[in-house]
Image (cartoon, helix red, strand yellow):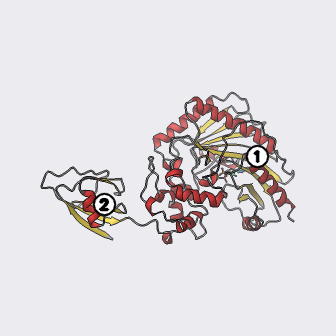
């Protein structure tokens, strides 16, 4: 649908964003547009026969200036019937349950919108289907995010009280030995007041990387000291070696691609790895789905040793960040803030690669876990976006991250793996 209207003396003044959406109406415009039924659901496509200029602000006319403006109705992304995601996609269900119309054209101060947040569910098959672009997304779009969070984590953020990490020693339950190939614990962290990686300028990416490099340079613990490898300039052999060792991330996830995480790739991206790996591998990814993914891993099933290294590393990163007058984004209601609402809370995913020959495919295993209502997540062993049919080693991890602490979440994973290994 399109419309043409002429605004003349006394009627001029409107601000547009770079897509032609109306940001603000000034002077008599508000009234004139109201009379014509033009609201923020319309966008300007041309002004006086020319394409609109971004952030156009027409001066109040001196008397003779009449501008012909053409409008078209914004493509209604709010209509979930046009989305590719199936009806069981969490954000799609939420859109059907809650009237979010008043948020359709809202924008956080760092520029995130509902349209950007749901782009993956609009264009791809998705399970959750929504990303935050900054801390403020969780406040402005709370009517949507709170429901998504409730469905995924079974936690009400209005009453949730997350605890920041204390970095005190924790004694964990043991994993069964034998069938476990490797153990890994990772968490997601973002710096408060910066946008998330799907919503950043190139400059901000470089700024985050430079803060991270200073953090790494400041490590004192000999288990943690190591080397930062920027993605830019990495040889393809080095890159492949790091990927095959399960250390490095790659830009192969269509969902992250679509929501903007890979923009300006490989600028500001890289990986830090410790040098002395006798106590396990300590890694920090810079500039992937979250600004930082902090992790420790090792062959075998010694979850306690992996945890100890992970937690010491996390504490060292936190100290290094604070030394630069920065802090991790954290809210008592949501825990540590992350791009994907599934990572809110502790941000922690404790996983094992475990051989479960009783389950011939990932889908068989997923179905079993769902039927038994186990709070664990099943993935392939080469990252969540990959298919590993025909190979019975699976990635098993805690599903919940919000509403409980790391100890409880690791125990859920350990109990889950123990139970799965008993299935014959
Ligand atoms: P996350 O989102 O938690 O970082 P992904 O599923 O995207 O995890 O996987 C990232 C990388 O980490 C992949 O290379 C994967 O093989 C590796 N990985 C995850 N868990 C383990 C584990 N327990 N042992 C070895 N590698 C692992
Ligand atoms: Mg991932």
Where does residue 151 sit, x and y in percent of width and height? 63, 61
Task: State the image coordinates of residue 333 (x, y, percent, origin top left).
Answer: 61, 48
Residue 407 is tagged as 1
Residue beneath the point at 68% across and 48% down: 348
Is 331 placed above or below 41 here?
Answer: above
**Residue occupying the point 78% across, 49% down:** 182
Is 9 left, or right, of 33 in this rendering?
left
- Is residue 251 in sight in this rendering? yes
Residue 51 visible here: no
In the picture, measured across the screen, residue 26 lies left or right of residue 161, that is left
> What distance separates the C-alpha of mark 2 from that of mark 1?
53 Å
Q: Which mark is residue 339?
A: none
Q: Earlier in the sequence, mark 2 or mark 1?
A: 2
Look at 50% across and 60% down and name the residue there: 119
**Is 398 in front, or is 243?**
398
Left or right: 225 as drawn, with respect to 305: left
- State the residue in front, 247 or 349: 349
Across and down, in percent, residue 409 comes to 74, 50
Residue matched to label 2: 44
């Amino acid at each position: 649908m399109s419309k043409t209207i002429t605004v003349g003396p006394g009627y001029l003044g409107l601000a547009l964003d770079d897509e032609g959406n109306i940001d603000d109406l000034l002077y008599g415009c508000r009234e004139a547009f109201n009379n014509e039924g033009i609201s923020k659901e319309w966008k300007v496509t041309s002004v006086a026969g020319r394409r609109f200029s971004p952030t156009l602000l027409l001066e109040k006319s001196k008397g003779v200036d009449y501008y012909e403006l053409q409008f078209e109705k914004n493509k209604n992304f709010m209509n979930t019937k046009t989305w590719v995601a199936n009806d069981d996609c969490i954000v799609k269900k939420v859109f059907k349950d809650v009237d979010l119309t008043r948020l359709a054209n809202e924008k956080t101060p760092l520029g995130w919108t509902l349209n950007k947040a749901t782009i993956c569910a609009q264009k791809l098959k998705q399970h959750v289907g929504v990303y935050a672009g900054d801390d403020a997304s969780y406040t402005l779009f709370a009517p949507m995010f709170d429901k998504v969070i409730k469905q995924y984590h079974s936690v009400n953020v209005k009453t949730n009280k997350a605890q920041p990490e204390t970095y005190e020693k924790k004694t964990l339950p043991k994993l069964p030995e034998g069938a476990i190939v490797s153990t890994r614990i990772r968490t997601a962290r973002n710096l408060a007041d910066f946008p998330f990686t799907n919503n950043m300028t190139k400059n901000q990416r470089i700024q985050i990387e430079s803060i991270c490099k200073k953090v790494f340079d400041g490590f004192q613990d000999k288990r943690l000291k190591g080397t930062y490898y920027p993605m830019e300039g990495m040889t393809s052999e080095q890159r492949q070696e790091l990927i095959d060792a399960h250390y490095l991330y790659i830009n192969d996830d269509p969902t992250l691609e679509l929501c903007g995480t890979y923009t300006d790739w490989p600028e500001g991206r890289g990986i830090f790895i410790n040098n002395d790996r006798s106590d396990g591998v300590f890694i920090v990814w810079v500039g992937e789905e979250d600004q930082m993914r902090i992790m420790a891993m090792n062959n075998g099933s010694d979850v306690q040793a992996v945890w100890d290294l992970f937690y010491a590393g996390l504490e060292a990163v936190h100290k290094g960040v604070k030394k630069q007058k920065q802090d991790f984004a954290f809210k008592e209601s949501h825990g540590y803030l992350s791009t994907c609402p599934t990572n809110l809370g502790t941000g922690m995913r404790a996983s094992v690669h475990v051989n479960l020959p009783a389950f011939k495919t990932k889908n068989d295993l997923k179905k079993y876990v769902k039927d038994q209502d186990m709070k664990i997540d099943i993935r392939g062993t080469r990252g969540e976006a990959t298919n590993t049919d025909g190979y019975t080693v699976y990635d098993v991890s805690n599903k919940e991250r919000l509403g409980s602490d790391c100890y409880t979440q690791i125990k859920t994973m350990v109990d889950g793996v123990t139970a799965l290994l008993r299935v014959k």
